[in-house]
């Protein structure tokens, strides 16, 4: 019998592949943070002697969910400005509040709250874009989640940096500081084509090429972006990004709601990834991403919650369901984005977008042990014919019971391990009192 760290067994195991495979009475073996075996519980029990054994008789094991576009610290602005169009919401509410309040303390507390919410919802990795990423990444290191920290870039002076070039310089220092970390890495994160000018975008494109780093950016979120781009630069958004050297397989483009046929063909040819954020798009009335067409064209699509100020939760199970439902309505085809494919977007799609496809996103031997266990003995999960259908169409995040990141158990029976829940909630209350008087 081989000594290993952990054996986790469950009634079902969904490794995540495009065939929608589901295995019954399977488990996986974790040793030193890595999945070293996946197979029938009976065989694993006979072959391994684990230090810890976790049996989950009513559960399905899935890869940890990958939230591929978010602004974690914005949890502190959850619900304070709703039911507004994107331009008004950003310019009259979000940006003024950020300029008054955002600093290291805000980012620490907001990101910590977001990580607590995400881990307990089965999210094991998030791709973040916000000010003070050195603070957010420290919170991720401390709380045990996987993160791609965005090296944020804005033209306009803000509390984090005076200029776009200072943003990039600070980002490069963070990248150097995190060089020895596997679990928290970095990507360039210029906010959007309309908030970052050509010179810093060219610098980012050159650095991205030299370092092999991803570029995470909002692209074509609203219908007026292209006409504004033509008026300002004489080029549509994607043509401009292409000319600046950014349209390539390192681009992680959030939203991509308003695309022409040429844009879709160019994105597919470049190998860029699209992060679909259906709930944020719906709430801000941004439009409808043509997910079905993007997938048919061979584009890798991931899922993101966007920030909690425009969603308003960080719940990727819900995002999967909305994505699957919305794709059918937009494509006028009930067969569009079937459940197993929606699950693929929320796991492997995100992993591939972030360049982590060999490390996370599926339950396979050799990958990091980022695992989510979901209980399926809830009323709404019965009777059960197909666990993947249940996961996408009926499961609530409250059914997530156990979560491992890098083989470490971060959520146990629904509760965060090693995190002071009351202290964290108390900090959120203090921020609500500072930012604006809540309704009582
Ligand atoms: Zn966003």
Image (cartoon, grey):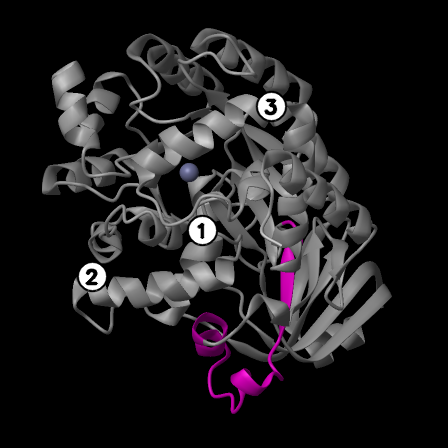
- For residue 424, the mark is none
Confirm or deny contact between disc 1 and disc 2 (CB under 8 A).
no
Q: Which residue is drawn at 47% across and 26% down?
A: 96
Q: Is residue 263 above or below residue 380?
A: above
**Which image quadrant for residue 23?**
bottom right
Residue 141 seen anywhere in this rendered image of the structure? yes
Give the labeled residue for mark 3: 132
**Which residue occupies the foreground of this view, 434 or 179?**
434
Magenta-colored span: 368-393
Q: In this view, does 38 lie above or below 100?
A: below
Give the labeled residue for mark 2: 330
Taking 41 as reference, is 20 left or right?
left
Q: Which residue is drawn at 30% across and 24% down?
A: 193
Q: In this view, does 377 lie above or below 409?
A: below
**Which residue occupies the foreground of this view, 105 or 249?**
105
Taking 152 as reference, is 7 left or right?
right
Give the labeled residue for mark 1: 311
Q: How far apart are marks 2 and 3 (CA)?
A: 37 Å
Q: Nearer the viewer, mark 3 or mark 1?
A: 1
At which x and y percent is residue 49?
Answer: 85, 67
The residue carrying pointer 3 sits among few (fewer than 14), some (14 to 19) or many (20 or more) residues within 10 Å by Cα, namely many
């Amino acid at each position: 019998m081989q000594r290993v760290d952990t054996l986790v067994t469950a009634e079902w195991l969904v490794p995540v592949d495009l065939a929608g495979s589901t295995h019954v009475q399977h488990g996986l073996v974790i040793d030193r943070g890595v999945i070293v075996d996946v197979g029938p519980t009976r065989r694993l029990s006979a072959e391994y002697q684990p230090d810890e054994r976790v049996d989950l008789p009513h559960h399905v094991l899935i890869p940890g969910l990958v939230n591929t576009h978010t602004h974690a610290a914005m949890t502190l602005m959850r619900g304070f400005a709703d039911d507004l169009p994107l331009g008004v919401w950003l310019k009259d509410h979000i940006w003024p509040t950020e300029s008054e309040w955002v600093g290291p303390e805000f980012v620490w507390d907001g990101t910590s709250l977001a990580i607590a919410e995400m881990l307990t919802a089965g999210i094991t990795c998030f791709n973040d874009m916000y000010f003070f990423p050195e603070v957010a990444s420290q919170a991720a290191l401390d709380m045990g989640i996987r993160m791609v920290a965005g090296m944020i870039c804005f033209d306009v002076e803000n509390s984090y940096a005076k200029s776009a070039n200072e943003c990039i310089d600070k980002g490069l220092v963070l990248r150097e500081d995190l060089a020895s970390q596997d679990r928290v890495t970095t990507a360039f994160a210029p906010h959007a084509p309309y908030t970052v000018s050509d010179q810093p975008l060219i610098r980012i494109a050159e650095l991205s090429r030299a370092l092999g780093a991803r570029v995470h950016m909002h692209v074509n979120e609203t219908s007026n972006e292209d006409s504004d781009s033509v008026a300002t630069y004489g080029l549509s958004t994607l043509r401009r990004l292409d000319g600046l050297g950014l349209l390539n397989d390192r681009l992680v483009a959030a939203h991509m709601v308003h695309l022409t046929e040429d844009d879709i063909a160019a994105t597919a040819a470049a190998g860029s990834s699209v992060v679909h954020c259906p709930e944020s798009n719906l709430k801000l009335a941004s439009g409808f991403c043509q997910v079905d067409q993007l997938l048919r064209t061979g584009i890798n699509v991931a899922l993101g919650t966007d920030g909690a100020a425009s969603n308003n939760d960080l719940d990727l199970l819900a995002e999967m369901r909305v994505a699957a439902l919305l794709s059918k309505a937009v494509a006028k085809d009930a067969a569009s984005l079937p459940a197993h494919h929606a699950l693929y977007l929320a796991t492997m799609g995100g992993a591939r977008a972030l360049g982590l496809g060999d490390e996370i996103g599926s339950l396979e031997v050799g990958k990091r042990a980022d695992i989510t266990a979901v209980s399926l003995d809830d009323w709404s999960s019965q009777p059960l014919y197909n666990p993947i259908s249940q996961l996408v169409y009926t499961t609530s995040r409250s059914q997530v019971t156990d979560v491992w990141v890098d083989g470490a158990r971060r959520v146990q029976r629904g509760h965060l391990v090693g995190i002071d829940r009351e202290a964290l909630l108390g900090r959120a209350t203090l921020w609500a009192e500072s930012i604006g008087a809540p309704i009582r």
